[in-house]
Amino acid sequence: MMNLVWLGLILAGVAVAAATGKAAEVTDAAFAGGKLAIETAIGLAGLMALWMGIMKIAERSGLMEGLAMLLRPVVRWLFPSVPRDHPAIGAMLMNISANMLGLGSAATPFGLKAMQELQELNPDKETASEAMCTFLALNTASITLVPGTIIALRATYGSVNPAEIVVATLVASVVAGVFSIGLDWAVRTALRTRGR
Amino acid sequence: MSLLNSLSLWAVPGMLALIPLWGAIRRVPVYDTFIEGAEEGLAIAVKIIPFLAGMLMALSIFRASGAMELLAEAMSGVTGALGFPPEVLPLMIVRPLSGAGALAVTADLLKTHGPDSFIGRLASIMQGSTDTTFYVLTVYFGSVGIRRVRYSAAVGLAADLVGFLAALYVCQWFFR
């Protein structure tokens, strides 16, 4: 899919340039784009180092575990088909907590572990179980408490107040998260009543 | 609203002070741990350079040729009806497909329109309120050999759309 989008952008750009005689502008723009990539990465590197350094302390000091404990009742309620003390619950909790703290690299291993545990409970190994669908719904609408990378990117481009979008982002992501979980529940319930 | 704004304003300084303090209380070697995490942060910045180069090049060509204006005009009926500025359309297309790609599109919007413009703020919020649906589905289901993902893809994409709409309305509410 990304291959198509990328190729489409370039081909459409060059085709329009051919029609409007903007070959020189397009050449300049292409090189400027490459240069901008490095400039952006250099600006971002220092800020990402700062951010990931702080978040590493959060990870080591048990902030993820603390958040996981707070979320445990909610997650148990969201996954009625998973036994209360099944290891899947623990793995999902760690994955969700890591996502909320913006620790993407820590979240993925827990997410994959959770999928393995859910697969143990799944009667049909090739078809997604209800619990898996709910977990993915929760994951694709991941609620972020502080979007560190975006704040860093905004700072790189000289925002007066890079963090001003924190609360707005939280509100929007909670709306999307609640919708996602609600829709998952509605679809699951509808399919059950139809006996599938 | 001023309370919410000061909450945003204090989010970063608050975290910079409280997280290391909490770490120290929990007897984490805070400086050494910071250095370790900072190395990972640097690695991430290096890893996204190819994505940035590819997407920024493609988007620059698309914009400089005038194709972006044509797309914006063609789509203005759809995006305009919902209230989206047509400039964020590429972000909506790339977001579910690639995390690093979407970050590059957001970088392009912040650079072109300024991070404190309406489009810049909207792109920032959209980036944070949605996720890489197709990537997550592929990796997570793929890792355990699930072939039939049932309704998950539809739910994930619907959630992305709602995330974009929520970002738009929240952005208008907060910053206008």
Image (cartoon, rainbow, N blue to C red):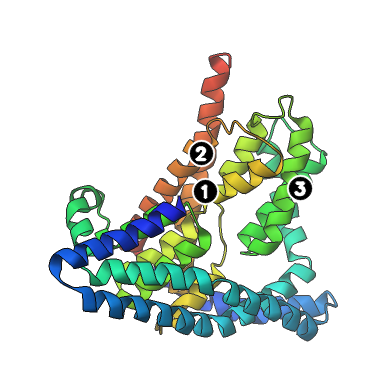
Q: Which mark is residue B52?
A: none
Question: Distance of mark 1 from mark 2, alpha carbons?
Answer: 7 Å
Cβ atoms under marks 3 and 1 closer than 8 Å: no
Residue type highlighted by circle 1: Thr
> Which residue has dot 2 on it?
B153
Q: In the rendered image, which residue does mark 1 sit on?
A: B133
**Which three-letter amino acid code belongs to the residue tagged 3?**
Lys
Q: CA distance from mark 3 to mark 1?
A: 19 Å
Residue at x 38%, y 77% (from the top left corner): A33
List x then y, in percent, for residue A90.
Answer: 78, 47
| Rendering quarter of residue A15 | bottom left
Q: Earlier in the sequence, mark 1 or mark 2?
A: 1
Q: Is A146 rendered above or below residue A51?
A: above
Q: Looking at the image, which is closer to me, A13 or A128?
A: A13
- At numbered mark 1, what does the secondary structure look like: helix, strand or loop? helix
Residue carrying label 3: A113
For mark 2, give the secondary structure: helix
